[in-house]
Amino acid sequence: MDKLLVEGGHPLEGTVQISGAKNSAVALIPAALMADSTVTIDNLPDISDVETLSYLLEEIGGKTELDNDTLVIHPENMFSMPLPNGRVKQLRASYYMMGAMLGKFNKAVIGLPGGCNLGPRPIDQHIKGFEALGAKVTNEQGAIYLQAEQLTGARIYLDVVSVGATINIMLAAVKAKGQTIIENAAKEPEIIDVATLLTSMGANIKGAGTNVIRIDGVDKLEGCRHSIIPDRIEAGTYMIIAASMGKAVTVDNVIPLHLESLSSKLREMGVHVEAKDDSIYIESRDKLSPVDVKTLVYPGFATDLQQPFTSLLTKAEGSSMVTDTIYGARFKHIDELRRMGANIKVEGRSALVNGGSRLQGAKVRASDLRAGAALVVAGLMSEGVTEITGVNHIDRGYAKLEEKLKGLGANIWREALNAQELEEIKSS
């Protein structure tokens, strides 16, 4: 196991290239198994979640070939093998295997998903959708069993706007008999990306990106080639990094419309943000103004950017309020920021950030993916060196992190954990 070391105080300048969207990739790879012939996915991010899902496809009889950012998936010999444990538990997005396998084989056995521990994130809306389509769903010994003689289209209203449930129901419904209507559907760009892949495979989907999605079931899905959209969360993280320490940074290969909620908040803080066709140019300022931010479903401020944005607010001179309406437990990074000298108080779903004082390098631990990003942002702004453990979380969502930051002028590197540090992690 490694730790990440960040020496703060270095001004950043240059261009950073954004990879394909993690939150698309983890749904597109399971979706590919529904085809009857080869599927090629381009612009994949170089992250551990892609490797995990590729392995899961091979476990059920598929063949995968990963070459740089292109994954070729051969689904012809896949079968409905139970996946109750193992790598399924390494990432939450493994639950997309439920919808994909149910849609293709009318049955699936999938272990309850793992991933970042962000508090209760029930999959009840997923199950509600599967049952509406005619599946019998049971929970036995920590695994979800799904079985259907025939999936039949239905009208499904989601009680909570959920990206995962919207995609999972869409996967299960594309080969169901008749029409499925998903109401109160999530609108995230990643849903449009998955719908685009499925449509290229032969699915009949209308309304992706709106709150009502209509799916007319088809009998057959064929292979295709698809390129993943840019990762708006990775792009947003680098925009925050540029706002924290950037002299002149261009975040390239982005869709600026996907980042408008963040751009507007950065401008409100006094950061110069210039959106171009497929890039965003950022210049920071010595003095940043405090702002209040509330996370909302897309197109609102993304919950995945709340944690790194909170780190940036420690530099603003004055008091800022951060409220997370999506995940109430998404403040585990606050204790680590306090170790670095941040003045932050958490009350329920909100954090009051009293900024303006320089952070100090410290030994901290990433508890989840975006908390790790928050600590990297904090480390870049700090005096001295910050040591970050829990790097495996960061590797789940940020491709070539050190390489990209070094390209901007950061001093960041990895070292292996010593025996004492490993023991401390095991006992914590």
Image (spheres, grey):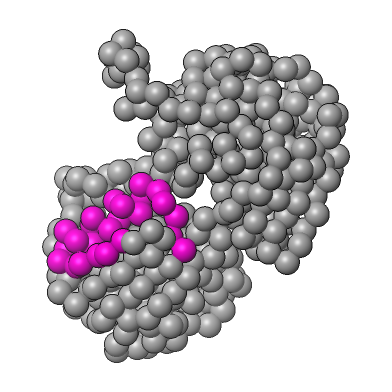
Quadrant of the rendered image containing residue 28: bottom left
Residue shown at 56% from the left, 79% from the top: 207
Q: Say if residue 350 shows up in the picture.
A: no
Q: Which residue occupies 43% across, 27% down?
A: 414
Q: Is residue 270 above or below residue 78?
A: above
Q: Identify the image quadrant of residue 198.
A: bottom left
Left/right placement of residue 73 relative to residue 68 reads left
Relative side of 354 to 126, left or right? right
Give me the residue at 34% from left, 61% from top: 67
Residue 401 image position (x, y, % from top left): 50, 41
Outermost residue on the top side: it is 420
The spot of residue 325 in percent (x, y) is 61, 43
Give the residue drawn at x 19%, y 45%: 86
Depicted 379 relative to depicted 187: above or below: above
Q: Is residue 280 visible?
A: yes
Name the spot of residue 39 as percent of width and height, x first.
Answer: 33, 75
Residue 419 on the magenta span: no
* Tag count: 0
Q: Is residue 422 above or below residue 296?
A: above
Is 329 in front, or is 268? 268
Near-viewer residue (100 or 284): 284
Q: Position of residue 118 (x, y in %)?
A: 46, 37
Vertical comparison of 239 with 188: above or below: above
Which quarter of the figure is the N terminus placed in?
A: top left
* The C terminus - image quarter: top left
**Which corner quadrant of the image does residue 138 belong to?**
bottom left
Write down the region rendered in magenta.
43-66
**Residue nearer the viewer, 282 or 217:** 282
